[in-house]
Amino acid sequence: MSLARSAAATQATVGGISYGPGAEAARDPRSDLARDRGELPQRVVSAKVSLRRRILEIWGSRELLGFLVRKELKVRYKNSVLGFVWSFLNPALILMIYYVVFKYFLHNPTPDFALFLFAGLLPWNLFNNSLLSSSGVLVAHAGIVKKVAFPREILALSQVGTAICYFFFQTCILVVFLAGFQVLPAFGYIPLLLFALVCDVILSAALAVFLSAVNVYLRDVQHLVEVLLVALFFSPPIVYAFADVAKALHDHAWFRWIYEANPLMWIVVSFQRCLFGKVIPPAGKIVKNVSPLVNGRLQPYHVLPTWGATPYWTGLACVLVGSIAMLLIAMVIFGRVEGNFAEEL
Amino acid sequence: MSAAIEVQHVSKRFRLYKEKYTSLKERVVHAGHLPFEEFWALKDIDLEVNPGETLGILGRNGSGKSTLLKCIAGILQPTSGQILLRGQLAAMLELGAGFQPEMSGRDNIFLNASLLGLSRKQIERSFDEIVAFAELEQFIDNQVRFYSSGMYVRLGFAVAVNVDPDILLVDEVLAVGDERFQAKCMERIHQFQEEGRTIVVVSHAADMMRSMCSRVAVLDAGEVISYAPPGEAIRAFRDRLIETGEAGALPGGEEEGAALAAEQAAGGRSASPQPVILGERRVAITECRLELPAVDREYVLPGEGLTILLDLKVRERLANVAFGCAIFAENGSLLFEGDSTMLGDQFDLEAGSSTLIFQFEELPLLDGRYTVNVRVQDGGGGVVHAFREPAATFEVVNPGKTTGVVALPFTVHLKTQRRDE
């Protein structure tokens, strides 16, 4: 009797369970079993949790995600004199440093270089901020991980959410920039930019979930990530032009293939195409003192890839598929090790 | 009606690392031979809790009771087996877990309640109630780091009980705030019980269990040794304590064991200041035994009698001797002290062996472990010839539901005066 009941309950719960209010939305209303039991939400605690259940649980906790993001935004610059201004000031100062170094010390010839830099830094900052803060997030929140039951991926995702908020603050500065340079973005490429943003978020989330879990067991990861991110910064064309790399790797198909396998490259280049494409279109532009002189004629100067819109879309589509796969794998791994978090912390 | 909580064959394994290697270097250096021992904190636990029931989980430190509670709460995942829960659950494992000191009380209520599984709408609905319950109306917009520790836990408790759970898990956190707030918390718990919600309480305080719970599960070394109404379960708990020697030496047991037990009982300090032997050691207490009223059990029921037997070895004749006895409660407080002169008796001890008998007709005591001290002294007082402290311990197990120290027989009557109109 008891066995039969529990078996039935288990089956019913596969349809929808949650830690809280999400249960009502997730439960299958057609289930007779659900009605039999009254309107009580169901939960199963066991060693194996299906991926589908994990996703439903995260979806059920989306409000918690919102509260956690708000908490991060409130707490991060609390008690500093400038407070919230830092969330604008910080990226602006970094931009300035890069600008001075690469424009004046290393003589990057790109006109409106600040804008070019900004276009690349936007998606990079999202990725960078997500990973930097999420790798240590479970350790930092050990108190609640040990004492409260909720889908712990939320903590890693809240760091990505916070990074998204900063992304939008920076976008505000960008608008001011564009107005200052009196440059319009390539409006036709705005859907591409949004698509690239989605890819960026999912890629960041995948790595954030993975790294946060691994860091519980190997605390080195947090420090390793800091170093790796510095190296990774130079992998997409943020401070240099894609065309330079393309030229250099022209005869090395293998290297070029590796370079283009970098998902960040596609995301960054898509942003640049939309925001910077009007300054120097892919077809190139004659720029005084910069354009190469061949046979007495000025050749067009390239910054962006010379291809049309389609390769961007196909490239990003690959990135999206890969990122989603990575996110699912990361969640499976997270689920495997989650059961021991409370002991390991 | 199906059970609110079904614990099915739940086992939990911990790995006890002799040393914890969390850095990469250490992991590489010690790769392959991580020094850990497997430890089963829970072994194949099966429990069913019906809706509206209050289950107590009782056990010693390290018996697995908190692990079980954490598994039910979903904080730990069982290594095998599963737990089915019907209804919204709120766990009070630590009050105010996840409070952000930098944020205001208001923001923290939202964050904390959301962590416990409430939706924004639900929080907004019960927000005023939470603030009123925590009595923090004035300070709700202050940063939590300026709160006193009392305010902090009050807020934590207020959020937890206002989650409106069907199942409430409580981990020995009821002792928060001042007495008035404690009473308020207990009242809220009783209200929960009346409303037919399911409560699971973890504690090692047997008395609280008795008054609160409808059933008690006793855990020992990760196994349920009893799952029964409180009286029976608490008896099983104490039996197990006695079996494993933690309740102190059995009657006639070794002196060291008794001393250790009494020391534990008194929280490390001895029950009373050690008397100084002023006599010339002409008499020695060779053994102290307890004679329990029933042979088939090793505890005393409230109201039963007890006999203390002292074997004495007298080297030299002693005239006008008095025998004293004292009984201490677990916390070291003196419950009884008396000696033979108070009864008007006078004894002379002849050289050789004698046995002295202290007889208590009736011990009106309730649950607990009690320590006995005995002494042989001069009839005029002053000179102590021999003493043994603690001489023995005994256990009283109360099958009823009353709590406290003294078993007072009582009845309740109601007299209604008819109004003559």
Image (cartoon, helix red, strand yellow):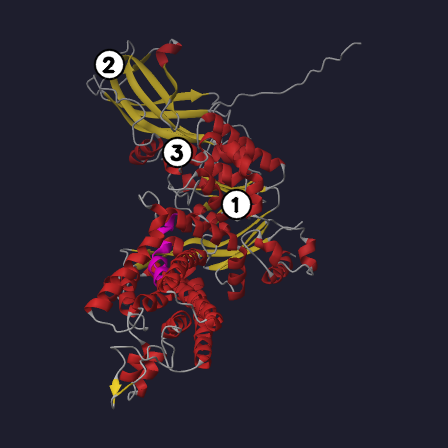
Q: Amino acid at mark 1?
A: Ala
Q: Which residue is mark 3?
A: B147
Q: Nearer the viewer, mark 2 or mark 1?
A: 1
Image mark 1: chain: B
Quadrant assignment for the N terminus of chain A: bottom right
Please name which of the two marks, 3 or 1, marks the residue nearer to the observer. 3
SS under mark 2: loop
Q: Which residue is mark 2?
A: B383
> Label 2 is found on which chain of the structure?
B
Q: Residues within 10 Å of mark 3 (few under 14, many from 20)?
A: some
Q: Identify whether A296 is placed above or below B333.
A: below
Q: Residue at x 32, y 58 (%)?
A: A91
The residue wearing badge 1 is: B90
| Mark in the foreground, 2 or 3 | 3
| First of labels 2, 3 by sequence position | 3
Q: Is residue B96 shown left or right of residue A114?
A: right
- Residue A56 in sight here: yes
Residue B113 image position (x, y, % from top left):
50, 44
Residue extending furthest toward the bottom: A295
Residue type beneath disc 2 = Val
Relative placement, left or right, of B112 versus B318 is: right
Q: Gap between marks 2 and 1, in whole Å?
A: 62 Å
The span from disc 2 to disc 3 (Cα, nearest Å) is 57 Å
The residue range painted magenta reads A127-143
- Asked whether B227 or A295 is in front, the reply is A295
